[in-house]
Image: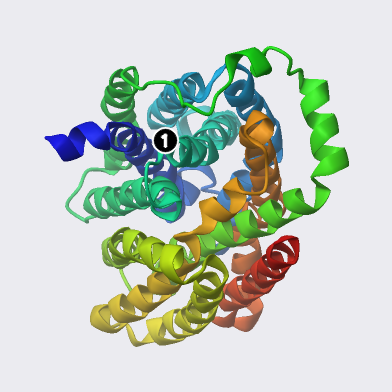
Amino acid sequence: MKFVTRHKPIIITCTGAVAEWLEFSAYLYLAPRLAHLFFPEQASAAGLVSVFGLFAIAYVTRPVGGFIFGYLGDRFGRRMTLMLSVLIMALATTGIGLLPTWEQIGIWAPILLLSCRVMQGVAVAGEFTNAAVFMIEQSRGNPCLAGSWANWGANLGVALGALVTALVSLPSMPDWAWRIPFLLSCTTSLLALLIRRKLIESPAFDTAAAHKLSPRTVLTELIIGHKRNSLIVILIGAYAGVTLYVGNMFWCSHVVSHGYFTASQANVIASVDMGVEFLILPLMAIVAHRTGIRKVMIAGLIVTAFGALLNFYLAAQGSMLVSMLTMALFATGVATFEAPMFKLLFDLFPARIRCTGIALAWAIGQSLFSSPSPMLAQRLSEHYGWLGGVICILLVCGVALAAIWGYSKNQ
């Protein structure tokens, strides 16, 4: 009971993160099915590109969402933004679950799907980085560990999303079963919203200082005084997005479209990725706090690159055991890098503009690098086979290494 009382803000925030990321991840895990339903007149590969294209287009507006939610967090408090993000995600995800398909309304089906994805992207822009900032500000001990709980909750949500989509992808399930992960939003998000009502505002939030903030003053301070730090956030955000969208979710579409695994098998393997990260994140956060953030994150990049290479190359064997092991290696690298990640970002900005600084730059990184990565990986795989996804991950490991070097120059 004492543990629950002491860590109540973290537990409540993680509960909302689990709900949001379960819903958000379902789109990419169900990409082959959505391609068939919303782009039936295209070949399977072209349909996948179209589904990934909608995913990328929706991210164009994400910097706007990042700025809005970041500013709201700095101006009106972290608690309010964390509740608002859950509400928007619930509306958008339930909307996807209720959408008519191409057969029913034609071109309007993908247009409505895009609208719902835009709303989802805005909600996640308000959730992920603000939750991490809130947890570190509430921390009483290891700030690396506190920041890692945002990823922990997201990974658990994605793992549950993979398992749920694996169930609804079974051959015995009815045709409409693909809607189930999205319609779950009605209950999971509303439950998360009720739980988050119990949050207490962050002690770092200064109401008097917040009243002086305007969107213009925040943007001016970020542009003039924090260009280098913002670039670091952009590059690290690119790594976090591409490793998830290409190394996990695109990998599922890749192996299913090539016939290496069924959709259910691929989603089970993908859940191993999230499960391993779920276990390793807190451990590596403790290691980073004791040995140094930079060393741990560089080690994570090396393991990520090696794990991605094996994961895509050995998938053609069609062995679930082999792919589970290579996915676990890849997940170990990602978790090692991301465990102290938010503590690094947290230190780059003063408290009065911290939410905006991190959320806006993170969203820019997601829009420029992460959102087009599944579509790019699909295109590259059409020319280079299994190397397509690996190329994307190696590139993003390189930009993340540049970000760590830039961070060390600031110290």
Q: Quadrant of the N terminus?
A: top left
Left or right side of 396 for 173:
left
Choose top left, top right, bottom left or bottom right for residue 198. top left
Left or right side of 61 for 100:
left
Q: Give the residue displayed 27% in from the left and 67% down from the top.
A: 265
Choose top left, top right, bottom left or bottom right for residue 63. top right
Q: Position of residue 129 (x, y in %)?
A: 54, 41
Furthest toward the right, the residue is 224
Amino acid found under the numbered disc labelled 1? Gln
Compared to 263, does 77 lie above or below?
above
Q: Where is residue 202 in the image (x, y as percent from the top left)?
A: 46, 26
Q: Kindly state the secondary structure of the residue where label 1 is placed.
A: helix
Q: Which of 199 and 195 is in front in this view?
A: 199
Q: Position of residue 328 (x, y in %)?
A: 33, 74
Left or right side of 128 for 351:
right
Camera sees residue 379: no
Residue hosting label 1: 138
Q: Give the residue displayed 35% in from the left and 66% down from the top.
A: 273
Camera sees residue 221: yes
Q: Nearer the viewer, residue 41 or 299?
A: 299
Choose top left, top right, bottom left or bottom right for residue 100. top left
